[in-house]
Image (tube, helix red, strand yellow):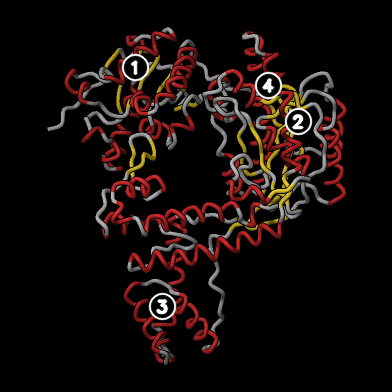
Amino acid sequence: MLTKVPDWGDPNAKIVLIGEAPGRSEVEQGQPFVGASGLLLKRWWERVGLSRDMFYITNVYPFQPLNNDISKISFSELDHYAKELINRIRSLPDPYLLVPTGRTALKALTGKDSITDWRGSLMSFEGIKVIPTLHPAAIMRVRKWEARCIADWAKIAQQAKFKEIKLPQRTHEINPTIERCQQYLDNVTVDAPLAIDIETHPQQGITCVGFSQLPSRSFTIPLGVKKTLPIKRRKTKEEKENELQKQNARISKAVFHGQCPLEKSLQKKAEIKALGRWKEQRKPLKVICRIVEEWEKAQGVESKTWINESQQFITVGYWPTNYHNELAFHVIRKLVETECPKIFHNGFYDIYWLEKYCGFKVRNYAWDTMYMHHCLDPAEEHSLDFLASLYTWEPFWKREAKEAEESKRYSDKLYTYNGKDVAVTMELFTHFFDLLKQRNKLDFYDKHYRKMKRPLLDISMLGINVDLEKRAKRKQEFDIELTGLLLEVAEIAGRSLAGKTNLSSKKVQTYLYEDLRLPMQMRKRGPGEKTSSADETAIRTLMLKFPEKLNTVGPKLLRCQRLGKLLGFLKDTKLDPDGRIRATYKFNTITGRLASSSNPFGTGDNAQNLDRELRDLFIAG
């Protein structure tokens, strides 16, 4: 019989702590959060001036789940206890702040599904403030998250002092006229820093550029002439079911026609077989769709194409004519080329687009909030939304760009999203500038970050020249060698181990661990997660231990893997049209060393770790 763990604390408490479910210690002592998680909370609370007697403490699910795994509880049961939780909260006299810990508690209270996205955000539930945070048990698996938990609890302690919900008040100007754009340009304070952020679209390029000189205001200038584009997205389960229902209804009309059923017109065995399969499974195969169209034409019935009902279109662009767009383009050029200090977040991305795509020259790239934070705390995460969760009261907003694509008001939502990005960037700059000044790191930032940015951008945009003739010849040689090796491996193994382009990891693992009965090699994939592997380390380990089984096939497997890696470097998609490879260089690693990756346009590669077998393909100039 399950033991229910009751709520604990004074119902008049101003803070309500909501856990997911009790563990063994909680069941034994009959109180929530008294085990290892409770000890962690106590330590954090002491640092921010809180104590256990300031809380009313409850759980979504009042029983200990099997193996402490709440995911094993059915949705319907959790939903029942979530409703009970909400009723208990409604019965409390006057709570100021609700603190859901973990995904289950967050979803029960707000319907949101990602605790890592929403932790630290100031939200509300029926007029009561909500600040979600990670469950302490998560920190026992990922220790580096402890710092962000302490930051969350510092925000909770601050908000628990008053009842009102005080969100940032920001004005986002998103639908300007050309005259208003020119007026904004004229009013920019040249001596004050100017934050800049861009949004891009794969079919349109830069869609808008946002500007801010105050955290409370942003000004977004759209780009592009207004037009309608189709968008690709995954169909929802309901859309798939609706589409299937309509297709089957159309097929049924032909199959069960009273005077001339479809079956009478079929002569080919494949068509008769496909019809039989449809009758059993009700799945509209391509063959069935084709013969139904033919039947409809023969019967004089209007035959429509099998339209994808879930196809949607969005209106992109903003300006009515190219002339208006060129004027907006001119204003943006003037703004980015002014001498006022510029602020970006991960400016290498924005500036690459502005200079390479638009032909602008961004002047006085003085500050970058990503690198300012790296200078303050190199070991922590540096994304804009994460930093906002630590240093601002802006609720999580980074899903709004994706939501904009699925909205009929795509442009307005996207431009507002851009306004939030640039206003938050401006707010973070004020925080980080003060912190750098307090810690005497402004000179360090200037020397190690500011002075490095322009040279790295120039290297990135220049790129590396490639000997295209030698590259094509090398690629052909590798392809021929790989094809031969795959045939040799298949002959030794007694069957093909090939996938689409190289060895299939799944087939190699089956061969090694089932056919040859070698001990399975495991690799750590995440916190507490291990999976079987047939990578280079696994194969070399097995070759050392079982040379009699792998001396012949082992080297061939390793060479196949290596050739796959080399051919990956030689993909045509890595080259730009001018035959050069361009990488993005950055210095936000923990140690501060340089790192590189593909450029913001999606081409290029890691230019620092090019294989020795390929370095002769690059030429100076």
**Residue at numbered disc 3:** 252
**Residue at numbered disc 1:** 40
Which amino acid is tagged 4?
His
**Sequence-first tag of 1 and 3:** 1
Measured in 3D between alpha carbons, the distance from the residue under mark 1 to the one under mark 3, in whole angstroms, is: 63 Å
Which amino acid is tagged 2?
Arg
Nearer mark to the viewer, of 1 and 2: 2
**Sequence-first tag of 2 and 4:** 4
**Sequence-first tag of 4 and 3:** 3
Nearer mark to the viewer, of 2 and 3: 2
Q: Which mark is residue 454?
A: 2
**Sequence-first tag of 2 and 3:** 3
Vertical order, 276 against 344 (above or below): below
Measured in 3D between alpha carbons, the distance from the residue under mark 4 to the one under mark 3, in whole angstroms, is: 71 Å
Percent of width and height locating residue 226: 75, 51
Specify few, some or many for label 1: CA neighbours under 10 Å numbering under 14, 14-19, or 20 or more: some
**Residue at numbered disc 4:** 448
Question: Tag 2, which secondary structure?
Answer: helix
Measured in 3D between alpha carbons, the distance from the residue under mark 1 to the one under mark 2, in whole angstroms, is: 45 Å
Measured in 3D between alpha carbons, the distance from the residue under mark 2 to the one under mark 3, in whole angstroms, is: 66 Å
In this rendered view, identify the residue nearer to me: 315 or 66.
Answer: 66
CB atoms at circles 2 and 4 under 8 Å apart? no
Q: Quadrant of residue 215?
A: top right
Question: Tag 1, which secondary structure?
Answer: helix
Question: Tag 3, which secondary structure?
Answer: helix
